[in-house]
Amino acid sequence: NRVEVIWVKRFSSCLYVNKNAVTAEKVRKADGERKERPRFFAGSYIPYVTVGLIIINILVFIICTFTGRMLYNNGGFYAGAFLEGKQYYRAITSIFLHWDVNHLFSNMIIFFYLGEMVEKYFGHVKYAIIYLTAGIVGNLVSAWYEIYANLNILSAGASGAVFGVIGALLVLTCAHRGRLENITVTKLLIMVIYSLYSGFIGEKINNAAHIGGFLSGALLAFLLWAFGKKRYNEGNKSV
C-alpha cells in the first residue's frame, strides 16, 4: 500500500510538472508570434473602415434609386464641372456613386476581400487616407484624359479607390517577400492586368481612373511603409 501511495504521488507530481510545462510552452509560442508580427504596421483585425465605407456606398445607392439622376448629376465627376465650374467636391462625391447593382456589387466584393488585409496592416487612419487619396487622384487622371481626348463624360464609382487598395496590397505583398497570407504578387498582377485589359476592350469603363488610383495607392502605401519601417528601425537603435 505504501508503494502504491508513493507511485500515485509521483504520478500526480509528473502531471503537475507537465501541465506547467505545457502552459509555459504556450506562453513562449504566444510571445514568439507577437515578436514576429511587424511592429511598424498599426495592425487591426477588425476592418471598421472597410465595413463602414461599404455601408455608406450601399446607403448612397439606395438613396439614388429613389432620387433618380439627381445625385449623379450633382455628385458625378466630369472635367468641365471640376475645372471650369470649380466644383472640386465632385472628386470625392463621385467615389460613393454607382450606376447599378452590378457596378456596386463588383466593386464592394473586391474591396471587402482585399481591403481588410490592407487595413489590418496599415491601420484604420492610414488605410482611409490611401483609399480616399487613390479615389481623388484617379478622378484627376480621368480629368486629364478627358481634356486630352476631348471627351465630356460623367463618371462615378469607387473603382479608382479600389484599384488604389490593390496597389497598396501589392506593395505590402512585395514587402513580405512576395506573399501575404493567401495573396501572392503573381495573383495580384494577373488580376490587375486582366482588369485593365477588360477596361480597354469594354465600353463605358474609366480606365484612366483605374490606372491613376492604382499608381497613387501603390506610391502612397510605399511611402507610408518605408516611413514606418524607418521609425521602427530608429526606435530599435535607440534602445
Image (cartoon, rainbow, N blue to C red):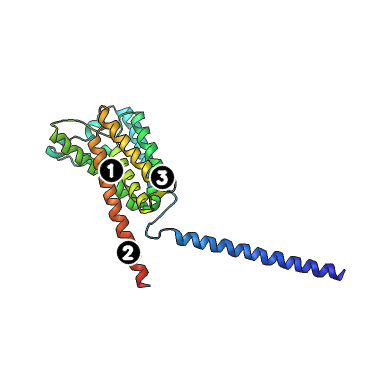
Q: Position of residue 172 (x, y in %)?
A: 35, 51
Task: Residue 60: tell me if it is visible.
Answer: yes
Real-space CA distance between mark 1 and mark 3, rounded to the nearest whole angstrom? 17 Å
Q: Mark 2 belongs to which amino acid?
A: Arg
In contact (CB < 8 Å): disc 3 and disc 2: no
Disc nearest the viewer among 3 and 2: 3
Q: Position of residue 155 (x, y in %)?
A: 23, 33
* Camera-side residue of 136 and 18: 18
Q: Is tag 1's residue or tag 2's residue first in the polypeptide sequence?
A: 1
Residue that mark 1 sits on: 214
- Residue at horizontal 19 percent and vertical 30 percent from the top: 153
- Quarter-of-image position of residue 139: top left
- Residue at horizontal 38 percent and vertical 33 percent from the top: 105
Q: Is residue 65 above or below residue 93?
A: above
Residue that mark 3 sits on: 183
- Quarter-of-image position of residue 40: bottom left
Residue that mark 2 sits on: 231
Near mark 1 (Cα within 10 A), the count class, few <14, some 14-19 or many ≥20, is many
Q: Mark 3 belongs to which amino acid?
A: Ile
SS class, disc 2: helix
